[in-house]
Image (cartoon, helix red, strand yellow):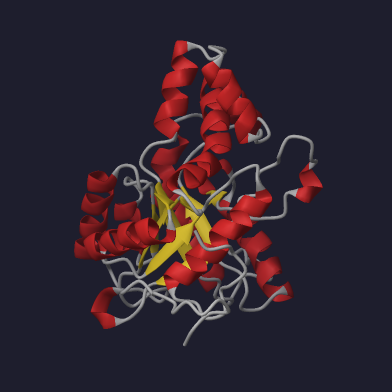
Amino acid sequence: MQDQQGQTPRGIPGPHGGEVRFSVLDRSRTREGHDGPEAVGTGGVMLPNHQPLVVAEQFGVLEALFPGRIDMGLGRSVGFTDGVRKALGRDKHAAEDFAAQLTELLGWFRGTSDTGVRAYPADGRRVPAFVLATGEGAAVAAAAGLPLVIGDLRGREKMLRAVDGYRAAFQPSAWAPEPYVVVSGTVAVAATEEAARRLLVPEAWSMAYARTHGTFPPLPPAERVEGLAAGGALTDKERSLYESGLQGHVHGTEEQVAEALTALVEESGAQEVLVTTSTYDREGLLDSYRRLARVAGLAGAGGADRP
């Protein structure tokens, strides 16, 4: 089958001879000059920041409203700064209780809490749960018998070790009969490698700013960030973090990205790739998604100019 421009969709070969699944997570990044309501999207729940009962009830409501359309992405990170942790009533050691919190949360859905309390409307519902990890949470996912979403792509060797450990230790459960691995990261596709790289610039700068100032600012235009970098307006620490933030992502032309993703899937054996790209240029992002759809072998993925 060919797409609208006569190009045969490629497709990335997955494990066991099938094709790998692709999904997109829009993380609701606010852009400069735009307000919050214009940033439509979603993300994961950092479980140590919340009471498991409350999380169960909230997802139970969502599942009741939108049956079969809700997933639970559960991470172990705590508040981003000391101020955020203080406001949440948590400290940096709260992540150490993640495994117990996860067990409690799943128990609310299965009606197995020893408190005598029932979580409505979560009780008896089955909301697919995924453990979000950068490495440390993989063992927790294996013990709980849950699918694993793991990033980031920049630490490839660490990620692959965690995936191997997850598969070796996986315990089948009512939630998943066998290991399921989703590799997650930034993927940017454009007509040229440089154009794809520029899509990475806004978030790389915003992350550098957040790690030096404690707040995550709206995504700026790439042109302004490049002007700041060229004009010497960044501190040494900001520059180091910014340049580091541009490294290790999957970006380039369709051919370059296809090659990189094929290698990633072969190395990890992942059943799914979760794309989490954020940038100021929404048109550029949509073009990147169209090109990625062609790389992924989705028929009808036209609409982007060929290089």
In-front residue for pair 242/180: 242
* Residue at the spot 80% in from the left edge and 48% down from the top edge: 37
Q: Percent from the top left, x then y, of residue 251?
A: 42, 49
Q: Percent from the top left, x then y, of residue 78?
A: 51, 37
In-front residue for pair 278/289: 289
* Residue at the spot 77% in from the left edge and 43% down from the top edge: 36
Could one spot residue 81 in this view of the protein? Answer: no
Q: Percent from the top left, x then y, of residue 178?
A: 30, 75
Instruction: Answer left or right for 115 relative to 39.
Output: left
Location of residue 89 (image quadrant) = top right
Q: Is residue 19 above or below residue 289?
A: below
In-front residue for pair 54/306: 306
Number of marks in the image? 0
Residue farthest to the bottom, as pictured: 1
Instruction: Answer left or right for 250 relative to 304.
Output: left
Could one spot residue 300 in this view of the protein? Answer: yes
Location of residue 286 (image quadrant) = bottom right
Location of residue 168 (image quadrant) = bottom left
Q: Percent from the top left, x then y, of residue 68?
A: 61, 78
* Residue at the spot 60% in from the left edge and 72% down from the top edge: 123
